[in-house]
Structures are given as C-alpha cells and as structure tokens.
Image (cartoon, grey):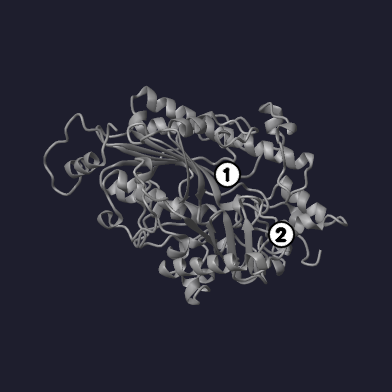
Amino acid sequence: MRYRLCLSALWYCLVSLSGCQREASPDVRPPNILVAIADDVSFPHMGAYGTGWVNTPAFDRVAREGLLFTRAYTPNAKCAPSRSAILTGRNPWQLGAAANHWPYFPEEFATYAEVLSRQGFHVGYTAKGWGPGVARDADGTPRQLAGMPYNEHTLIPPSSGISGNDYARNFEAFLDARPSGAPFVFWYGALEPHRGYEFGAAEAKGSKTKDMIDAVPAFWPDTDSVRTDLLDYAYEIEHFDTHLARMLALLEARGELGNTLVVVTSDNGMPFPRVKGQSYDYSNHLPLAVMWADGIERAGRVIDDYVSLIDLAPTFLDVFGLDAASAGMQPIQGKSLLPVLHDRASTPHRDFVLIGKERHDIGRPGDVGYPIRGIVEQDFLYLRNFAPERWPAGNPETGYLNCDGSPTKSVCLARHRKPGLAHFWALNFGMRPENELYDIANDPECLLNLAGDPAHAGRLDAMAERMALALRAEGDPRMEGRGDIFDAYPYADEKNRGFYERYQAGEPLQAGWVNTTDFESPGR
C-alpha cells in the first residue's frame, strides 16, 4: 500500500489550525474523497450485481477496481433522514427532528463535511446535498451540511425528467477552485433516478426494450406501463453513471484517481410503491462500491458483511486520522470501514444492521408518521410496526402521499378497483400487522410474512430482543415510550403542516408528487 493512515494523520497535524508550523513533505499526498449518491436506487440495480437491464460501466469499474458490497443498508429509506445519517454517522432515531422528512436539522449535530471544511479541507457538492428541509445555525445563518454548492454549469438533458445540472462540469469547477495542496471532499448528489420521468424515454431515446426486464417484482402487475416505468428508472440510473464516468476520467487525467477514495451508493430504494419510504428489503438494501487504488488491499473483493450508511462518516474521518471527538462531532454510531478496505478485519464488519422510519411526507391526520423499527440479521428481516392502525403509505383520501406518483402506482390502484386483483393494492398500500418477518435470502420481495409461523417464533423473539437492546443502547426515544416526540417536531415547510385537515376542509391543496387519480375514499 503506497499510502498509510499515519501519513494522513501527520499531514493533518502539519496543515491544521492547531498551530503546527512545519511544512508537509512534498512526497506525502493526503487522500481525497469523492462520494457519489444516486437519488433512489435499490439493490441490485447496477450492472456489477448482474442486473442486465441497467448499464452502469462506471459503477462496475469502481466495483472491479475496488470493492463491491452486497449487504449495504440505509437506516431510513427516505431522502432527508438517510442523508442526515450519512453526514453525521448517527442513526436517524439519534438525530431528533432529523429522523423525519422535511425537518429542521438540529443545530447540535455537525456533519463530517462541516468539520472537514472548518479544518481547511476543500469541501463541496453539486445538485442534491442534504434535504429536503431547513438547516440553520442559532443565528439563522444557513448551514452547508454537505459543503459549498457548485451548480453553475448546465446542459441540455437527454429527457425532460432528467436534471439540467452538468454534474461532471461542476465537479471540474470545484477542482479548479481547490487551494493548492488541499485535499478535496466532494459530494456528487445526482437528482436521478428520482421522480418524475419522461414516460417512454428509455425506449425512445435509450434503445431499451421491455423484454430486457427478466422479471417484474411480484408485488406489481406485469404490464407494459410498469415495464416502461422500470426502463425509464434504468435510463436515469445510467445518466447518473455517465457523469460518474466523466468524473473518474477527469481525476485520472489529473493524476488524482489513485489517491481518491471513491464511494458510490444511493440514499434509499427506488421511487416505486412498496419501496421508497417503506422498510422492506428493496427499500433499505442499496448498491455500494468503493475504489481507492492507494488505500485498498486486494482490490476486486466482494464484501458480504453487513454495512450501514452510518459507517461512511467515520470512514471519511478515519481516512484523515480523525475521530468524532477530535473533530468536534456528537458521538458517532457508525463504524469505520478502513479495516475492510485495508483487508485487516479479523471479524465481520457487522453481523446485523438496524433500520426504521418515523414521519415521511404528509397526508395523515395530525401530521403523524408511520413508525417502524427493524433489524436485518442472517438474511432475515424483522419489522416492528408501532402504529399498525395507520395507513403505511399515507391515507387513501389524500393520495397515499408516502408513495411518489408514477405509472406503477396508478396501475396498482387501478387493479384495486377491479374484482380479483385487490392483492396488488393490499401489498403496496394496505394495512400491516404489528410484526413482520421475512426470509430475504429466498424472499427478497418480502411477500411471505413468517411472523405467525410457529417454526420461526424463536427467531422472531430473538431478533426482536436484539433489536430492542441495540436501540435502547442508542437512546432511541421510541424504546423509552417517548416515540410521540417525532410526530411533534414541526415541518420546515408551512405548506406541509396540517395538510390532511386543510384538504378535508376543502382547501384546494395538491401535493406535487401524486396524480389526481391517486386520491381515494378509505373504503374503496
């Protein structure tokens, strides 16, 4: 290995604000970090995992020349809380209001990007950093949770659903603005494949065909519209990957690629019914590949250990010889991945991961969420639904607002209105029991709930107990009977507050991410 952790610690001492006066040795190069986060991609929807209807040569290169992770999970399958966890290294239930979507980000939690920026690192991002929500200091100054924004350069997108941000050109502008000798930390936050899509763009402009999809998940009807929707999702993933390829080429041309830790992942699962905003395997199980020629031993390995996205922040700090305490952050729950990268881990990185959710979006009476906690262990997923009397995807009469509007959503709701086909509605939008248990090795779509099977009673009890012990150790208010605190946190956007009651009172309200046909009466 050409670069050692001790050198990064030495470099940090030499250039930090702590008063060290000597100059760094010219042959010691501190590393850089490029983290690329797609917006809403589920495992295994990258080419390196064998998904043939998604073409991702850049992701595949990172996996081939670095490490490919097969069991990476976000603790919360929604944009803002997932990104809060990535940036802080803490689970959402440890982040106060940041456990929710559209929150005010609490002042007391620093992010790795803020810390590194204060230490003199060159830190920036393009497009989507943290959000949606509001983050301000005590004096009202806006915070840059992911660094300084670089969004000046635009392009003509290949379809109307794709952003006009020229991500790679903005990364180049960030590099051009870099102070001499400073390591960089960059967050590439693509806006794809977030909704909405240009329907049929993949077939019309991307030369894709519906027969490329070998199977449609069994919780959706296998129709032309659903297959078109999946292809359009793939088309937008490929746009994300194209800009990643340009960024890698740019680093290579500048002689920086080998010295850059490249992390490629997503914030949560695909924006389809039963996935994004929920807690099944497609919701939280994400792609993850890491490349770092100067820092990874035995490149090309496939890592089957469990990994949580809260492990990224401590990894980034560890790369520079820092920890949460020395960096001025709140204690971090995540675990550095450096032992895995250096091939020095004597035990699995993790043998379980925790997941869960609180309030996502809007549309329930009293602005309440759908609280869940879960644990993934030994290829089983256990979920505890704390309010099974509530609608998991949002109330029918306000359009199931924790599910993005889409052709697939509309097809599932249309099947609900036809005799004999209501099971699609039930799987995607119906009420759920308090306990759910799935054998995700054999049932990754989480169709067969084993919670009521006596043969799995011991496993369910053991997983529930382990989950509760871990959550109590992390100070989860829901384990202490204080879970209502999450529903009491205000929305950071006034238009979201009291949406259900105002809509029921006849105000002309319409959430922008659903279709008019999504609104139903509860009995339909």
Does residue 133 show up? no
Residue 492 lies, with reference to residue 251, above or below; the image says: below
Q: Are marks 1 and 2 in contact (CB under 8 Å)?
A: no
Which badge, 1 or 2, is on the more N-terminal residue?
A: 1
Instruction: Residue at the far right: name it.
Output: 419
**The C terminus lies in quadrant:** bottom right
Residue 138: percent from left, percent from top: 35, 62
Q: Secondary structure at mark 1?
A: loop
- Of residues 483 and 106, the one nearer the viewer is 483
Residue 81: percent from left, percent from top: 49, 57
Disc 1 versus disc 2: nearer the observer: 1
- Of residues 378 and 340, the one nearer the viewer is 378
Q: Label 1 neighbourhood size at 10 Å, few (<14), some (14-19), many (20+)?
A: many
Number of dots carrying numbers: 2
Badge number at residue 429 = 2
**The N terminus lies in quadrant:** top left
Relative side of 135 to 344, left or right: right
Residue 71: percent from left, percent from top: 51, 47
Which residue is disc 1 drawn over? 43
Relative side of 429 to 289, left or right: right
Instruction: Residue at the far top: name it.
Output: 253
The amino acid on which the numbered mark 2 sits, given as a three-letter code, is: Phe
Badge number at residue 451 = none
Does residue 33 show up? yes
Residue 430: percent from left, percent from top: 72, 62
Q: Label 2 neighbourhood size at 10 Å, few (<14), some (14-19), many (20+)?
A: many
In which quadrant of the rendered view does residue 13 lie?
Answer: top left
Residue at 38% across, 47% down: 337
The amino acid on which the numbered mark 1 sits, given as a three-letter code, is: Phe
Residue at 34% across, 40% down: 342
Q: Secondary structure at mark 2?
A: helix
